[in-house]
Amino acid sequence: MSDALVDPDGEEPGVFEDVPVLDESMLPEVVAELSGQMHRLDDHVAAHDEHLRALHESFEALENSLTEKVNLARPNRWAWEFLTREQATQLWAETRWFADYLIRRYPLPSEVSIPPCWYRHSVAVDELSDVYAAWREAYCSGDRPSTAMTAWRDRWLWPMLHRLASYADWRECKERRRHVDPTARQQSTDDEFADFVTADVETRPEKTPMVLPWPTKRGKPRAHAADSAP
């Protein structure tokens, strides 16, 4: 009887690949290496988690921004008529800073200068806060060179100052060096408004008319009812 080892499945000796035998003395080193690899994997997973979290926050911020831009039913923080006490307090502070900044930064001739009582003139308040919003857009949107700064002065600042000179009704304030209530007074919409609107609405169709004077998606203008009559 042969002493050769026979594989239980009937394979001849030498068919199996040599399997290395682990030296017990190397076991601590192998375990330490595996532990180090596990720690490195944990670090990679943590880094990926942080990256994914940052991406999620960025997409969420973008979504909120886009939602705000398309939500035309919600007044923004610059609409004085709809501000809360907290919002109004904040915008008053910012607008006052901006008005003082303009007065200090741009020494203007008297005909277009801003008097100290500007805040008592609602036209000036709206104009100044709106131009301040445009200033924020031009000067608080990154450090890259941009023509927005020059456009802000050319398109918004100088025209605003001339509009205020014409419409803010503060000429007497400047002459007397104190606030003078404007003499011009406009009355609110009269009581006939409701009847006028009712009469106008009654003349309109319940549904949008399908006869339009401009080309439709097919590229051909639709004929008017009068034009298509035999």
Image: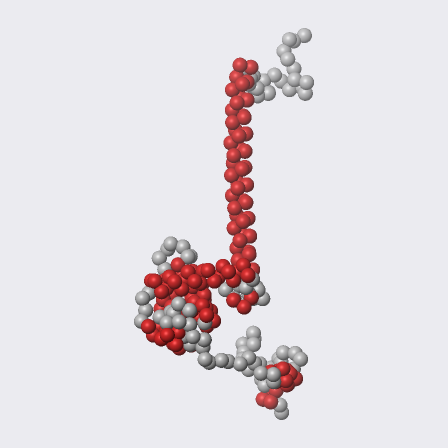
Q: Quadrant of residue 116?
A: bottom left
In the displayed structure image, the side of residue 97 where residue 211 appears, left or right: right
Foreground of the two, 146 or 7: 146
Residue at image point 43% right, 75% down? 180
- Residue 23 lies, with reference to residue 180, above or below; the image says above
Q: Is residue 164 visible?
A: no
Residue at image point 51% right, 27% down? 36
Residue at image point 53% right, 30% down? 39
Foreground of the two, 190 or 120: 120
Foreground of the two, 154 or 212: 154
- Residue 195 lies, with reference to residue 132, above or below; the image says below
In the displayed structure image, the side of residue 23 where residue 4 appears, left or right: right
Dividing the image into 4 quarters, which one contains the N terminus?
A: top right
Dividing the image into 4 quarters, which one contains the C terminus?
A: bottom right
Foreground of the two, 4 or 198: 198
**Residue 53: percent from the left, percent from the top?**
54, 45
**Residue 140: percent from the left, percent from the top?**
41, 57
